[in-house]
Amino acid sequence: MNGTETSTRSELTPLDWAFLCMEQEDTPMHVGAVAVFRADGPVDRDRLRRLLAERAQRIGRLRMRLERSWLQPHWREARDFDAAEHVHDHEVPSPGGREELAVLTSELIADPLDQRRPLWELHLITGLADNRFAVLMKFHHSLVDGHDAVEVGVRLLDEFTDLTDTPATPPGHPIEEALGLLGKPDKLVGALRGTLAKSGESLGIAASVVRNMRIPAQSSPMHAPTSPARRLALVPVDLADIRRIRSRHGGGTTNDVVLAVITGALRRWMADRGTDVAEVPVRVLIPVCRRRRNQPRTGNNQLSGYLCGLPIDEPDPGARLKSLRDEMSANKSGGPLRGPGAFPVLAGRLPQLLHHVATPLVSQGAPLLFDTMVTNVPLPRFHAALDGAEVTELFPLAPLAAGHSLSIAVSQFRDTVHIGVQANRAALPDMEKLAEALPQAVAELCDGT
């Protein structure tokens, strides 16, 4: 990408920049998804690759390249951008199944994105049985959050290619906006009051973060030395079973039930490893998107989060679900701007210069605050196809924090809840046992009282 560039430019917000500062060679900070398609006939790999490149070329955000600066890093659109350089193809031994797909995808997801180029990749994977193929999407977290990743991804599909191209990134001009307030005293006073309120709010978040730090149990399998190697599990759960569990146990949200399933699976997996589940607490970070519908964009990421303790020491599956339902209700009542899980809000209010120095160090301390991440990526209900091949499965993938053994991402697509587990391969040689424990936890809740 050495050609002449256009003047299109936008600044990174502090939170977007923080995701770049977190990245190390063995902790890439990209989000991803594996979409599986079923074609009516043989798969034309060359045609699909060309089609993906043509559609990606028209998406403004995918044309943006990072330009680093100590004072104000920013995105700039490259005139000589060629999407075809970001679209790759691979083939698993035919006839491949979900396990072969997970093995190849785990190798591809482990590679960091090249920060000298626009921060995304598409990987077309063929060789799957029954005329199926898959597309692995990788987007750096500084470029998109989960909501935006969905928005970009659907623009690659047949039904949405005619959508009007949106601006590549928000046009933030913080210095010009600040100067503009000087001539408007009423707005300046309002802005100062808002700043003071945010300062108090930020101090409250920071104090809560410090109060909730703890040393992880040495026997916890949720923590391990950071390693670049990855393993993936792609686990579908029938939505009808989730609804049956909600009915049997007196309601709650789909997300509450999924958390209970994950809790039951972790309990079974840890017990099979010989871990004393009564002595190893598990606390998860649950990211929350703060962007409201029709709200003006002020950055690619507008996130907060909740911290939630998983009751893995509780033997009764119904009691585990009730406990989680109560804790998540309390979190939602408090709102996304309070508590230790709101640390992304705090990160979004720190100057970029501080992130250069502090964020790489602070990110190593994630295990002091939480043991794993469980993120729910909302998907709209729609018919989705690529070159006429219908989407049959859609597994999201979340980044793996330094010092953590696994991260979990969940999405509901049509009649299935798709669970994508990304793990440190050195720490989880028994990944298949955790994958097997997820449907077992579903059955336990379905059969429980």
Image (spheres, rainbow, N blue to C red):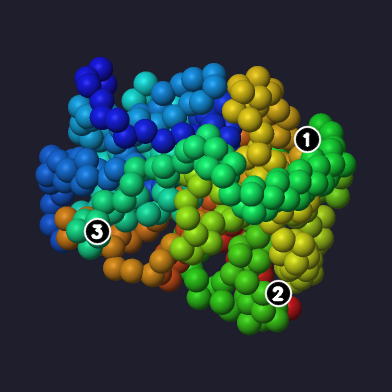
Q: What residue is at 67 percent from the left and 74 percent from the top?
A: 252
Up/down of 103 relative to 239, above or below? above
Earlier in the chain: of badge 3 and badge 2, it is 3
Residue under circle 2? Answer: 448
Q: Name the amino acid, label 2.
A: Gly
What's the CA distance linking mark 1 and mark 2?
Answer: 34 Å
**In the image, 329: left or right of 439?**
right
Neighbor class of circle 1 (other Cα within 10 Å; few <14, some 14-19, many 20+) is: some
Q: What residue is at 73 percent from the left and 50 percent from the top?
A: 193
Q: What residue is at 64 percent from the left and 49 percent from the top?
A: 185
Q: Name the amino acid, label 3.
A: Leu
User: Which quadrant does the N terminus fall into?
Assistant: top left
Q: Name the amino acid, label 1.
A: Leu
Element marked by disc 2 = loop
Residue under circle 3? Answer: 163
User: Which quadrant does the C terminus fall into?
Assistant: bottom right
Element marked by disc 1 = helix
Q: Nearer the viewer, mark 1 or mark 2?
A: 1
Residue under circle 1? Answer: 368
Element marked by disc 3 = loop
**In the image, 372: left or right of 107?**
right
What's the CA distance linking mark 1 and mark 3?
Answer: 44 Å
Say which quarter of the image contains residue 274: top right
Earlier in the chain: of badge 1 and badge 2, it is 1
